[in-house]
Image (cartoon, coloured by chain):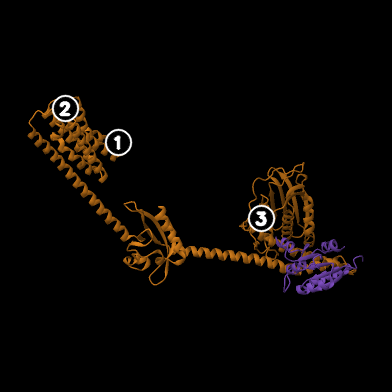
Chain colours: A orange, B purple
Amino acid sequence: MAVQAVKAVLGAALSGAYIALVGRPGALEMVAMAGLVAPLILTLLAAVKAPLALLEQASLFLFAALIGYLAALTGGVHSPLLVWFALVPAEAALAGGRPAVLRAAGAAVVALIAVAALGALSLLPESRLALPAWPLYAASVLIAVVQAAFVAAASQDRQRASDAAAAEGAAMYRFLADNAMDLITRHSADGRIIYASPSALPLLGVAPESLAGLAPSALCHPDDLKAMQTAFMDAAYFGRPATAEVRLKKAGGAHVWAEIRCRPVPHADGTGSDIVAVTRDISERKAYERQLIEARDLSEEANRAKSRFLANMSHELRTPLNAIIGFSEVMMQEMFGRLGSPKYVEYSGLVHESGNHLLELINGILDMSKIEAGKFELSEEVFDLSAVAEASVRFVKLAAERSGVALKTAVSPQAATIFADKRAMKQILVNLLSNGVKFTPKGGDVTIYAGLDSKGIEIAVVDTGVGIPEKDLVRLGQPFEQVEGEHVRKKEGTGLGLSLVKALAAMHGGEAVIESTLGVGTTVRVRLPYAAVGEDGERMQPRDGKIVPFRAA
Amino acid sequence: MDAKSKTVLIVEDNELNMKLFHDLLDAHGYNILQTKDGMEALDIAREHRPDLILMDIQLPEVSGLEVTKWLKEDDTLKAIPVVAVTAFAMKGDEEVIRQGGCEAYISKPISVTSFLDTVRRFIG
């Protein structure tokens, strides 16, 4: 921009000299002089618009054309202004690179030839110079020399500035390379090292100079060679940045996990690319990743072991239960003749009942495991809840009679038929009833209520038992958690019952809530928002979306 | 009893369960062959051609599924129905057992009534 300003000033000086020597300029000469001052306009244009190189180029062409025009007006090949043509490429040197200089010189030559051709064809007007020739030549050369001196000085300044910038850049680059924790390397397109930064020593234990000329195969673990070569290939031949995680050989034969980020560095002459790679020690991260993978494998193995154990336990428990339940059933039926005392019939019934109770427990444990593993599937249907409630009552009737607890059911007509998993509902009711019986003293009672409200079906099992302290309520419903306290410690049970109830209710899109008052009793409400069935036998509130598998906390 | 002529081969390695199945079938008039060994089961089947085979799946040497496979590969034996009686009751077990060639599946512990119903379904 400064160059353009200098040129504009020079143009103005030249115009002034022309007016002094030739006299008042004609219309064409006015145009020419305006052209000489044009760089000023260009300077202004450049201040607001982007393609500076284009403007410079245009200004140089204009400069050559004007000199030719003025030369044509002042004697053609004899004009004292011809020496000015030499300044066109000189200015170009200041403005741009070698191609700009060549183009400017070309423009000057073309203009010179045009002036000479017009002269040879006698098409030029007579010279309008008023003074004798020699002072004119002297003045013209003087001005040209002054401008040439300007150009040379500016060019020198520019060179110096560029050298200084280059030196500063190189120093900064070396500073970065020398002090970076990461290893910085430059590779030829085939991956061989051209330069390695001093970080080679801490990272690989070798002097950076000793790496020069080494190929990737000499640098990394054989198993990782492909990854490294692929990354280099991406950078060198496809011109895109690439990353590889590889094990690099250290001095002494060990390997270090490293991440190599590489990108292409195109050659200045456009004949392909080198590769610059930044290599970082990631052994800590890799060690951490390995630990995570090991931990995951371990946990998966533990989970498989748990599944195997459950399958085996189920098998081993069912085998003797088969004999217990089977033989007691044969005895109850008196298949081979009468047992004699009715007591024996009762006892065989008790054996059979206990066997079935044990079977229920085993099934409960398996169900809980399946629910926790997300493998439990509901099979929902419309069925008679009153009948299931009665069946559940029969199931715990013997136990209730033994402890002197009355069992009642109060199922409202709107809740007599519901849509749910029948087996799950029976499991919920049996678990809640037997819990109620277990914790209710003699003379108390346990009641199943079922009704319909705006939130859907609610089934409540209410006992008049010992109750549960508030601080223990929150812990209930975790598998194998039974409230510990003097008043309940003697009770049998795994704590599985309530967690199964919660899980099964949740699988139905509902919930199970416990309320309890010490000494008054406990109520467990099971809310089933999607279980209500209308008079037409259709579900009143169909459930949208997928069932979210329940996971016990 | 009307089933007198029918013969059932019980393959079962647990003595108590063998006794239970034996006594139940005996009480209902079936002839009974028994073994706790899968290989022997194959020999007995060839020699006596039972009308039904009750097959425990977990056996000491070869699994009941393996024995069933051999039975079904033998043209002279494959018409004999094989009912698996097993304590494998996990989800998916029944499917595996049916794919193994068994005609029916009874899980342990059995219900006496449905056990006898299943046997009757095959050999009256």
Foreground residue, A355 or A261?
Answer: A261
* SS label for mark 2: loop
Mark 2: amino acid: Pro
Q: Position of residue A18 (x, y in %)?
A: 14, 30
Residues at marks 3 and 2, CA–CA distance in whole angstroms: 110 Å
Q: Tag 3: residue type?
A: Ala
Judging by the rendered image, the residue that carries numbered circle 2 is A125
Residues at circles 3 and 1 in contact by the CB criterion of under 8 Å: no
In this view, A509 is above or below B9: above
Q: Which residue is located at x 28 percent, y 55 percent?
A: A172
For the residues labelled 1 and 2, the Cα–Cα distance comes to: 40 Å
Crowding near the residue tagged with mark 2, few <14, some 14–19, many ≥20 C-alpha atoms within 10 Å: few
Residue A84 sits above or below residue A543 on the image: above
The disc at residue A503 is 3
Residue density around tag 3, few if under 14, some if 14–19, many if 20 or more, within 10 Å: many
Within the image, what quadrant is residue A52 found in? Answer: top left
Could you say where residue A395 lies in the image, as x and y percent from the top left?
78, 59
Q: Nearer the viewer, mark 3 or mark 2?
A: 2
What amino acid type is highlighted by mark number 1?
A: Val
Question: What residue lies at 64% left-to-right and 54% top-to-bottom?
Answer: A550
Name the residue that disc number 1 marks.
Answer: A48
Q: On what subunit does the disc labeled 3 rest? A: A
Question: Relative to A1, does residue B115 appear above or below in the rendering?
Answer: below
Which comes before the other along the chain, label 3 or label 1? 1
Q: Secondary structure at mark 3?
A: helix
Q: Is residue A96 visible?
A: yes
Rendered residue at 79%/69% (across/down): A323
Side (left or right) of A39 relative to B28? left
Can marks 3 and 1 be said to lie on one chain? Answer: yes
Disc 3 + disc 2, Cβ < 8 Å: no
Marks 3 and 2 on same chain: yes
For the N terminus of chain A, the quadrant is top left
